[in-house]
Amino acid sequence: MSLIQKEIAPGVTLLGVSADRFKTNEIAISLAMPLKKDTASVNALMINLLSRKSSAYPTFALLNRKLAYLYGASLSAIVTKVGEAQVLKLGITGIDDRLSLDKSSISLECLKLLTSLLLEPRLNENGEFYQEDVDSERRILIEKIEAEQNEKRVYVLRQAEALMFKDEPYGVDRYGSVDDVKAITPCDVLLAWKNALSQAKLMITIVGSSNIDMAQEHLKNTISKINRCYKPLPETVFVPECNKVKEKTEYIDVNQGKLVMGFRVNLKPQDRLTPAMRSFCDIFGGGPYSKLFANVREKMSLCYYCSARYTKQKSYIMIQCGVNEDNMDKAVNEILHQLDEIKKGNFEEEFVSSKLALSDAITSVNDAPELIESWYNSQIISDRLITPQQSVEENEAVTRQQIIECSRLLTLDTIYRLTAPKEAE
């Protein structure tokens, strides 16, 4: 697979990943903007609204008919946060051009549909979004937020993030809050839409055997109609270490307690040890060979699950455990003990297993166009894109000494416990 990168306009990049072994193409338009409490909810609502109706397809039925005409193409709207950017994505999956009955460019038609949804929304005679459309999206977004709150494993992670990053943009949830969603008006959505088109960093990703030159021509003609005033994303807040651990215990009627530990990582995304930090995190709490799984979960039976995840764009590691209240302090102590074991260099078997597992996991990105698109979408705020193959090579070059170096870059920042209320004596 080859990677083609073209600058359409300031802050607008076309990324083509040539791959002719798939039956489908994956096309996405991603908009990255600063993550802010005041705009998170309205931005999330706006991108979902754009995915359902437009000026050309004012009803869901008409849009579905168009998708059926495109051989059953499927649309999606996704909201994520990457570093301290909120990323709004409109995506479409369609069959490869080679499979169309009349040899027409289905991928170009899919791209045209995406740009139409983004640039030509359904507006009323006053040039505003319809109240009923906004009301409908408000209900849907509130349901999404409440669904995450009801899923306690997700809920406790979000709460730990809010505590750990309470004075930083990253502490804002990707969907904002229920109260903020309830307050959204059609005028708010219109302003959010205009600001996104004008100021956001745009990345258009096309994975498959599409004609990139045709896509580039269409995008140039389309983007030229937007009154762009591109503002580069602010630099992510970097806190290298923590001087005082933040702790909070929340009591909710749950069958299984939850424990989250957040560590600051004194390493910026482009530093030389970043590939090694990913390997360290995998050795620490990745697969079944990891320190946390093999010892905290299996050997000592302190928790039902125990895993670690490294987020390089924000420079932190979060550990999640399902654990009974009686074992929480023991689990915290053992997790810190396993970190010390890595600092001492006691991870020979884990190191070998992790190298193989990580390389396999990275290589598997190439197995599906949607995985490839997600791989590059996660790098939207980066100055340099890394291919899966380059990432595998970086992983293979990691040394044991680098793992030890990485282990010494962690400081514990946050401990968040979720447990059932204690019964009255």
Image: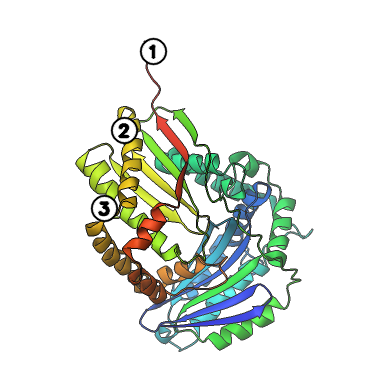
Q: Which mark is residue 15?
A: none
Is 215 or 289 nearer to us in this picture?
A: 289
For label 1, the SS is loop
Q: Which one is earlier in the sequence, the residue at label 1 or at label 2?
A: 2
Residue labelled with disc 2: 330
Q: Which one is earlier in the sequence, the residue at label 3 or at label 2?
A: 2
Q: In terms of image quadrants, where is residue 203?
A: bottom right
Q: Which one is earlier in the sequence, the residue at label 1 or at label 3?
A: 3
Say if 172 sits above or below 86 in the image. Answer: above
Query: What separation in Å lies between label 1 and label 2 (alpha carbons)?
Result: 24 Å
Is 399 or 9 nearer to us in this picture?
A: 399
Residue labelled with disc 3: 346
Q: Quadrant of the C terminus?
A: top left
Residue visible at 40% across and 57% down in the picture = 405
Instruction: Please state which of the two labelled residues, at mark 1 or mark 3, is closer to the viewer.
Output: 3
Three-letter code for the amino acid on which mark 1 is drawn = Ala
Q: Which mark is residue 424?
A: 1
